[in-house]
Every structure is written in structure tokens, then in C-alpha cells.
Amino acid sequence: MERAALLRCSSLAPNRFFYFPGSRSFPLRRLPASAPFSSRSASSSSSAPSTSSRLLHRRRHSRLLRVAASSSSSSSSSSPSFSSAHTDKHFSTLSARAVATPSAPQFSSDVSDEAAEKLGFEKVSEQFIEECKSKAVLFKHRKTGCEVMSVSNDDENKVFGIVLRTPPKDSTGIPHILEHSVLCGSRKYPLKEPFAELIKGSLNTYLNAITFPDRTCYPIASTNTKDFYNLVDVYLDAVFFPNCVEDELIFQQEGWHYELDDPSKEITYKGVVFNEMKGVYSQPENVLGRAVRRAVFPDNTYGVDSGGDPTVIPKLTFEEFKEFHRKYYHPSNARIWFYGDDDPSERLRILSEYLEMFGSSSSPSESTVEPQRLFSEPVRVVHKYPAGDGGDLKKKHMVCLNWLLSDKTLDLETELALGFLDHLLLGTPASPLMKILLDSGLGDDIVGGGIEDDLLQPQFSIGLKGVSEDDIQKVEELILSTLKKISEEGFETEAVEASMNTIEFHLRENNTGSFPRGLALMFQSMGKWIYGLDPFGPLKYEEPLKALKARIAKEGSKAVFSPLIEKFILNNNHRAIVEMQPDPEKASRDDSLERESLEKLKASMTEEDLAELTRATQELKLKQETPDPPEVLKTVPCLQLDDIPKRTTPTPIEVGEINGAKVLQHDLFTNDVLYAEVVFDIRSLKQELLPLVPLFCQSLLEMGTKDMSFVQLNQLIGRKTGGISVYPFTSSVRGSTDLCSHIIVRGKAMAGRAEDLFNLVKCVLQEVQFTDQQRFKQFVSQSKAGMESSLSGSGHAIAASRLGAKFSTAGWISEQMGGVSYLEFLQDLEKRVDQDWDGISASLEEIRTSLLSKDGCLVNLTADGKNLTASEKYVSKFLDCLPSSSSAATASWNARLPLGNEAIVIPSQVNYVGKAANIYEAGYQLHGSVYVISNHISNTWLWDRVRLMGGAYGGMSHFNPYSGVCYFLSWRDPNLLNTLDIYDATGDFLRELELDNDTLTKSIIGTIGNVDSYQLPDAKGYNSMLRYLRGVTEEERQQRREEILSTSLKNFREFADAIDAVKHKGVSVAVASAGHIDAAHKDRPNYFQVKKVV
Ligand SMILES: [Zn+2]
């Protein structure tokens, strides 16, 4: 499964490998991860876009750098993505939650050897890890051989994870289906979906399950100790004693089954994983990623798809499925991770209860991953991918060069050096390999993730998409000749310094965003531990870093990096060239092949067979529809309302003024890092310039000044700061026709470099010149390619954005800067760059002029008091340089997209279905209960109907409290009109709802969990600023909290009328395949206005 969006949604993971650059300008791209609404420019965004180093922004890096990189990924939705993890189950809900935990621990952070022995564990070794200020102890369970890493420190965001080695032999998706299924009920928790119950009613800060190519991970996190142990117990029981090995209906629901409602109808395939993977296989970059894996690893487990190929999944039998669990889900094949400020003896006590029930097993030897032997000759493969038939198909090829770097795992020093090399080659738009590829004009955007080292053997991949058929060869030659040239000439000293500072900054800052730090460490450690190597090594970067720096200082960077390029890439014959050709027929051909085989099957069945299948279909539906009995639901441990703090925790804020500009200061401990945002009002901008804003932001960082090329500017930012990013932010303001619309410049640096930081922000804002036509053209192509990818990958976000634009002005603006309208703008702009560059350049300048003013400017600072005070003089100096009055009065933007149902056609086998209305405009007044109700609708009504019964990968309802727009969305959905009917029935569902106290309490606690998201200091300061901009006071927060805590069934029933506005006045937007739209129109002629953009 995957991490969900609010509730369940797709993961970043599949994209890790082909992680697309330039996400800054494609705000919707990463949405599916957690909140379809977390787009930077989306009006409903409440999450903090990262202070991303723009450098690490684009791609993920090798393991040692990954924690660092993850800090730059965006917002609450982010988690480090893993190249290899093709999926990631359920979603962690919105984010982490902070709940007060007792301060001083009452226990020792040590477990005596004796105490461990008593519980059946032997202490293997222990180390203090300076890098994360933690004591780490490795235990081995005597009876089973299960290894346990127990990490103790003062982090309240506690983490537990159990990881099993699960290499598949085929592409039936067994590990993935099992990963979903074990969370569907177990011995102690025999309900339909304990996982869904935990999402609903716990304070988890992370809850998920992830299938990698060779392992399956079940991680959870919470700041509340009681909650944490509840979650641990549910997960352990699920992994070791799941009901799915006895109940075939679970396998059918999560994996695949034939569905036949009526013998006269057509047989179809259904299944959550089946549809999830259909969605994955509809995304071109994912198809490429899988083709690469097959080409690079033809002989070992990595050549097959642990997630499941939709054409192969139906070959899987229940017997094979059960056997896989029996073989691999055994403690002797498991590695368990604990992390945080809880009592380490309690950890062993809980584990021993489970582990004692098992003996030893042969599974560790059976699950060993065999290395891929190195090729003696390079190989080349060509595949097709599903493409839209719009645009010039000849220019939609992709080509990617891939090397398997070694047939053994590399030592940490070499890996670290390769990580640096990766950053030097591709880490920023100014990095030589990245720059030369993009400058070549041979393609629209980069594919391939550079160095990937989270599997047994590391690989290196790089290529381009949007390549013309005739240029494939040129791309290959360019990559090879560039690498050769770099190896001969070495890197510029400034570039090496910039990479070094960037990587060091992020390692030390250890800012994992909303992703728990303990989990980031677990993944690092597991990358070696899972192969039987030292689990401590990957946690310690100081020594190898020091050694590497010393080597560079002594021998020069060329002596360090050139031999690496030669050995691992240029002179390495294990090279696989993968070319992907666009095929506009592929999606429909796959569809008809599937239909034909099902028709054949039906033709071969007797009447009795068909009657039996209809019966089985009904049996499964009945099971899905039948709610768990209350006594079964009660088995899942849940907190009580008394466990929840009654008051919101305010973030310190001091509002002042410097030189006439508003300055917000948040006095928080940040380990000497200064986080700063400079915010400009863009409401004086002419309406027609709005779609240019994202490209304006990118130009500021990637165009260069009179004295500095953009490469030099980038290097300077890398050398002096932890990164600078620029992006638009727009939101409605509740109870006002006014809206807030800003450009935010976000930066961070060691506090001692505050002056450098503000100088660079000034330089970016005032000195960058909009003169580089060729670069601008690249931005346009990249953005366009990115938007096109997000149509098939994040169709629900596209639909949401489109809907928002119909019901609020802020939504309209966001859509102009990141929705379908933006894509259309880019398609047009691409032609215009050549004809009217002067005009475009003048428009960029015009945006700058209307933006830069002391009057509309706000500065937000987060650091401790001493560093705040010290930075004031640089803020003052910075503000002095801004002009004092804005050029124009507020422009009147009063635009919305016309109301009307729309279907946006994409080449895909699955749909994204949305419907929305503005319920403020229908008379609804905000009450905190709406958060509880909206969560409840997502977690019960839509979960059951859209996901379990409908077979969609996810469905959710979302309410934007600023604009009043209430949304329903589904993703990777095999249905279309059916899903809309379910949305329309929500009012009746609420009217007829019966809720016992426990269920209500769970919904309330789950909601509080979302509200109190766990935040690192920079996110606290950032979110406090967003509240300030939107006029949300601490009093109002407290009032909402009280309303949430006192939500009653009456509120649910009353909300039925409000939500009926969506049924009666709402509009539908579907991002769907042509076939599904045609079928819908047979039922409801002309229901949708059909729009084709790719
Ligand atoms: Zn999944």
C-alpha cells in the first residue's frame, strides 16, 4: 500500500528512482503523498513547504545523504522517498502530532545484561552514536535469532519498526499484497482493518507499511508513550498472527479477485493492490523505472516487481500467498528497531511476549538476496509506455543510462564519496552533468536518480525525457562525453566547497521535516543491516566525512573523484541503456487485452460457475459492508479524551517592526540555525501575469546576475547557506472577500552567517537579470513535462485544484499557477518564448517591480533569542535596500473558472474523481466539528465504499476552512459515476449515522492528532507565520480545539444539510481515461465537458 493522503494515497516512493527535478515549479507533483492539498501554491495549503535547500530539492541522494535530503522535501507530506520502495502502504496521516509527554524520564536508558537475559535476549554490542546523541544497543533474541536495535535518546517522537526480508521470485506482487493484508485483522485484533482504526483514533506521528524490492517495513511513530505501545502491539500482532493467512476474502480484497454482480454482466478484476499498481503502471516514469530495474538486474530478485505487475498479479494463488507469509514472516527473518525517549526495558518486555512463541527457522538463509553478477557487455532495451496522443509523439521518447556499480556492497567511505560525487554531478541545476544535459536542448527534463544505494548493490542512472526519436543516440553520447570530460578536468573548487557545505549543513541540521528522525535513521541503518552488515556504521558519518575532507584537502578533489567516475562508470561494462517509446494506444490496448481475457474466461464458464462467482462476489461485498461488532472494535487499544491536552500549544511569536516592515520573531531552540522567510504581497499584480509567477520564482534562483553566472550564484548559496527557495503562496481568508497572496523567499543558514543569508536574498531578489532566454525556455519545458506527469500521477490533485478554482478566487489563482490552466499556459508560452522573449522578459521585470516594496513586506525569523537579536541588524540592512512604496494599488482579481462538470482525458487505466462545492456560500458557519466529521467521512464512509468496495486506491473528503470549499476525491479509481453517486449519498449517511461513544472518541482523537501535528522548530515558526497571514488568532485556535473536543453526534447529523450542498450545487471534475468517460456518457449523456490537454 502506500502512505495515504490525508488518508490514503500514493507514495513518493515509486518516484524516488525517477524523482523528477524541478518540483519547485510543479507544486502539484508531490501531492499524493499526504495531502492532495499541500501544494505550495494551493490555496488550501496549511503545510510548510520546506526550507528546502534548493539544491537538494530536486533529487534524493545516496543513503548517507538521505536524511539531509529529506529535510528539503516538502511539508508534511514528505518523507524520504526510496528508490526502491515501490510502494508504501497506507499513508501516514497528515503528519506528526505533538502531545505533551512527561519531561524527565523515570527510567534508566540502560538495560542490564541480566534483565535482558531474563527476557530471552543477549546483548550483542552497544555504542554511543555522537551524530544523533543516542545510545544504541544491539540485542539478539536467543530462541529465534531475531535482532533488535534499541536506540535511546531524548527525542519524544518515538519510533518502532519491524522489517522482514521478503525477496520475491516473480511479479505477482506477493510481498506488496501481504503488506496490505496483514493489516486487515489479526489474532488479538480480529476486526476488518485495525490499520484504519489506528488512523482514526491514535496520535501517531507516522503509521505506514512499505514494500521494497527485497524487504517489507512496518514503521510507526508517536510522541505519546501510551499511544506508542498501543501501536507497537497492534503491529506486532498483525505481522506475526494475521487473519489473512486463513481468510481468503482478505487476499481477494487486497490482492485481486474476479467480480461479477450479475451473471448477465461482464466479469472484472478488482483488488486494492491490483488497482494501485494499474495506477503505477500508467505513469511513464514508473514504467521507465521498472524497465531499468529489469535491465540492470536480469538475474536476481530486483529484476521482478515486488509491487506486482497488473498483468501478472492475477496469477497469484492464495496457497502461494500463505506460504510466503509462513516462510518469511518469522522472527528469525525480522529486524526490529526502537528509538526515542521511552524505557528500553519495556521494549524488550513487549517483544519477548511475541518472540517467545516462536522457535528457530530456516527463513534467513532462504531470504538471502543473491547479488547480480556484472555484465561483460553493455545491453540495450527498448520498451513502450502509455502516452497521450496530443503533441508531437516523436518528441516524447525517454532514454536512460544505467550502471550497476559493483557486484558487492561498498564500504562506507566509498559510498560517502560516491554520494558527494552524485551531488557534484547532479545535485543542483548548476551541477555540470545536470546543466549540460538540460542546456543541450535534447530533452525536457532529467530522468534517473543518480546514485541509488539502498539495495544490496548500488547503481547510477541518468537520462532525459521529452527526447526526439532522432536524438536518442546524441543523449547517450552527451552523457558519456560529459562524464569523460569531468573525469579529465575535475570539478571547480567552488563547486566542491558548495557541495561540501550543503551536505554538511543538512547532516548537522538533521531536519527531516515531518518525517520522524528516528525513522530516517532506521532506514539508513537497515540499508546495511538487512544484508547482515553492521547496523551501527550507517549512523556515523563524522569519521568518514572527516577522512574524505582530509583527502580532498591533501590530494585535491580530482584525485578523489576522477578515479571513481572512471572505475564505476566509464570503465564499467555493466551498463544498460533503456529507451522508452511513447505509445498512445498502449493504455487502451492493455484495457482490451484485459477485457478479452475476461470475456474468454466467462465464455468458458458454466452457468453454475457464473452463479458461484456471483455468490462469491456478494459474499465479499457483504463482508465489506458489515461493520465490525462493537466488542471487536473495542479490542483496538485507544486513548481516552483525558489523555489529550485541552489547550493548544502556542508557538512563541513577537510581532514588531523594523524600518516600517512587519517582523515576526519566534524564539525557539534551533541548534544555531537561523530560519528566515521574507514575504511579499503580490496583490498589486496584473491578473494576466499570475501564471508567470512560478517561472519568475525559478528565474530568481536560476538566472544569474550582472556579475555572477547562475552557476556561481548557486555555488555561493551552497557555500554560505543551507539553501534558499522561492515560491508563491495563496489562501482565502475566512470571513472576508480579501485573500492573501504572496511570494515567499525562504532561507536558512548557520546563525553566524545571517549577514550572508540576507545579502544573498537581496541579491536574488534585486540583482538577478531576466535575460537568459535559453534557460527560461528550459524552465518552461521542464515545468510543462512536470505538469504532464502530474496528470497521470496526481490526477486527484489536479482535479482538486480545478475544483478549487471554480469555488474561490484563491483557488483560481492557485490553479493559474499549478493546475490545468497553468499547463495550458505553459504549452502556449513554449511557443511564445521564441517569438516574444523581450515581452516575457519585460513581464518578469514587471512582476519584480510590483512585488518589491517595504510596505507589503513581512520578515519571519525562527531561532533562539540570542540569534534573533543578532540577526536584526541584517534584517534592517536588507529592508533599507527595498523601495518604500508599492507601484500600484491592489489589483482586482475576481476570477473563477466557470461552474460545470469537466472530464480531463489522460492515457491511464484508472481515474481520479472529484466533486466539490463552497459550503460557506451555501450558508455554513465554521465549527470545529467539521474537522472531526470530515475525517470520519474519509475514514469510514469513503474508505469502505470507494476503496474497499469500489476497489479504488483511496478516497477522501477534505474541507478548506479558509475558502469554505468542501471536496470529495478519489484516486486510482476503477469507477467514475459510481464514485460520484457515493459522494452524493454522504448527506444521507450522516443523517442515518449511529455513533457509539468509543467511535466518536476515536474520531476526535484522530482529528486532534492531525491538528497537533508534530513539528520541528522551523515548521512551528513557519506555520505560525501562515496563521498570522491568514488572520487566525490563538483564541480562535483554542476555540476550534474546544469545538473538536466536544463534537457530538448532533453535529454530524446537522452537517448532513451542509454537505448536501455538494450534491445539489456541486461540480464534478474527473481526470480519467477516454474509455471511462465514454462509458459514463452512455449512462449520462453530456454529463462532462471533455477537455484534452495531453
Ligand atoms: Zn500498496
Image: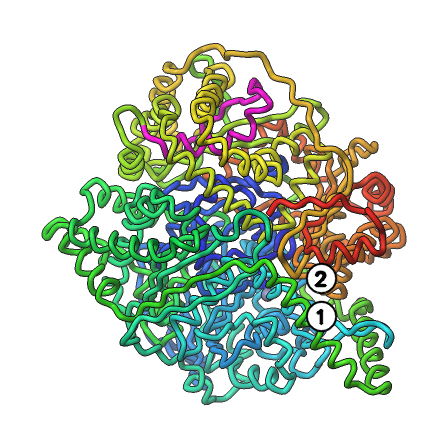
Q: Is residue 604 above or below residue 807?
A: below
Q: Secondary structure at mark 1?
A: strand
Figure quadrant of residue 41 = top right
Residue that extends furthest to the left in the rendered view of this protein: 554
Residue that extends furthest to the front in the rendered view of this protein: 470
Q: Which residues are magenta?
A: 675-704
Q: Secondary structure at mark 2?
A: loop
Q: Amino acid at mark 1?
A: Lys
Nearer the N terminus, badge 2 or badge 1? Answer: 1
Q: Amino acid at mark 2?
A: Pro
- Tell whether label 1 touches label 2 (CB within 8 Å): yes
Say how many tags the image has: 2
Q: CA distance from mark 2 to mark 1?
A: 8 Å
Could you tell whether 713 is left or right of 784 in the image? left
Q: Which residue is drawn at the image coordinates 38% and 56% (left, top)?
A: 472
Figure quadrant of residue 401 = bottom left
Residue 912 visible in image: yes
Residue for badge 2 = 974
Q: Magenta span has 690?
A: yes
Q: Position of residue 789 (x, y in %)?
A: 54, 50
Q: Position of residue 346 (x, y in %)?
A: 50, 68
Could you tell whether 340 is left or right of 622 in the image? left
Q: Is residue 574 above or below residue 971?
A: below
Residue for badge 1 = 270
Q: Is residue 822 above or below residue 382?
A: above
Q: Position of residue 484 (x, y in %)?
A: 21, 55
